[in-house]
Amino acid sequence: MLGHLIYNYEHLDDLRIQEEISKSVYAKTFQGVNLVHTYNGKKLLWPRPYLEDKLILLKNRGHYKGASDLINAGLKYFTQTKIKGLKYVLVTAADTWILKSNFLRAIIAEMEQKGRFLAASSWGRVEPFNKPHGFSTDLFVIDIEWNRKAKLFPVDYDGFVKKFSDFFALQYGIPILEVAVQYNFQKYFISHFENNDMWRKRNQAFRRIFEREPVHSQKGVRFNAWPKIGLYTSPTPQVKQEALKKMKADFGPYTLKLIQAKNLSYYNNAV
């Protein structure tokens, strides 16, 4: 059983198709999916669940604060709710799809075999040592049993911004949520282990998803497709439409609509 949290503002067509992918592809691979959708868009646009097992509605506090609220609320549900056979939770933004479940299965198998608790990509790169710079929040996997103990989530994003506001102002930087998550992860191991044991435990606990890197080019342009692993994050539907056509996959009515569409102006343009 896999837990799947999809968080979303108003990418409604992306969301519907991702729910169809989750309940067909992932459910077969992991012998079931418990699907949670956290949403802070207009309630009239999503008045009732589609395929999700749990719908959580929140107010929108903006980009980073809103995303933090959505992820925290969904993982709070999984942390507090005992679901038989569920240990790992996949977290994705609505427009981030994994079409090849074998890639996801391999990540989780490695986490289980090697005792890793979190899998994510570096959101950026810090040279020359290639250290992760922020953990991807649009795509990560977490051991929810470990989170009950470690309390990586909920992330106190507001507190993070307040604590490091002078630093970000000096660096002419932005306090992004991805860095707040990495900070929480690092802080846990500093607080619970000493010296070399801390570094060893931290490195053992993290599965960096190199297969998805780099997320951004050196010029800051964000990549949106990694066909080898079946990962697509494009905010526009053309790339995803082509990927679905190549798979010859029909996961549900909204997937089929995208595959057959000749005019894509409807996509994510809810009225």
Image (spheres, helix red, strand yellow):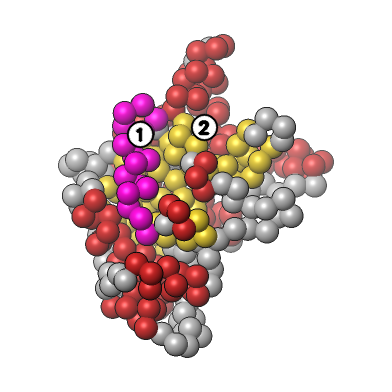
Report if residue 114 lies within the magenta region.
yes
Identify the residue at image location x=54%, y=19%: 199
Amino acid type of the residue that numbered disc 2 sits on in the rendered structure: Phe
Q: Identify the residue position indicated by label 1 in the image.
A: 110
Position of residue 124 relative to residue 41, above or below, is: above
Q: How many marks?
A: 2
Q: x, y percentage for residue 23?
A: 25, 61
User: In the drawing, what numbered circle is on residue 185?
Assistant: 2
Determine the residue positioned at 55% across, 12% down: 196
The amino acid type of the residue labelled 1 equals: Glu
**Residue 44: percent from the left, percent from the top?**
40, 78
Asked which secondary structure carries label 1, the reply is: helix
Question: Percent position (x, y) of residue 190?
Answer: 55, 21
Q: Is residue 76 visible?
A: no
Mark 1, other Cα within 10 Å: few <14 / some 14–19 / many ≥20: few
Q: Which of the 4 image quarters holds residue 64? A: bottom right
The numbered mark at residue 148 is none
Look at 34% across and 67% down and name the residue there: 247
Between 179 and 100, the residue placed more toward the observer is 100
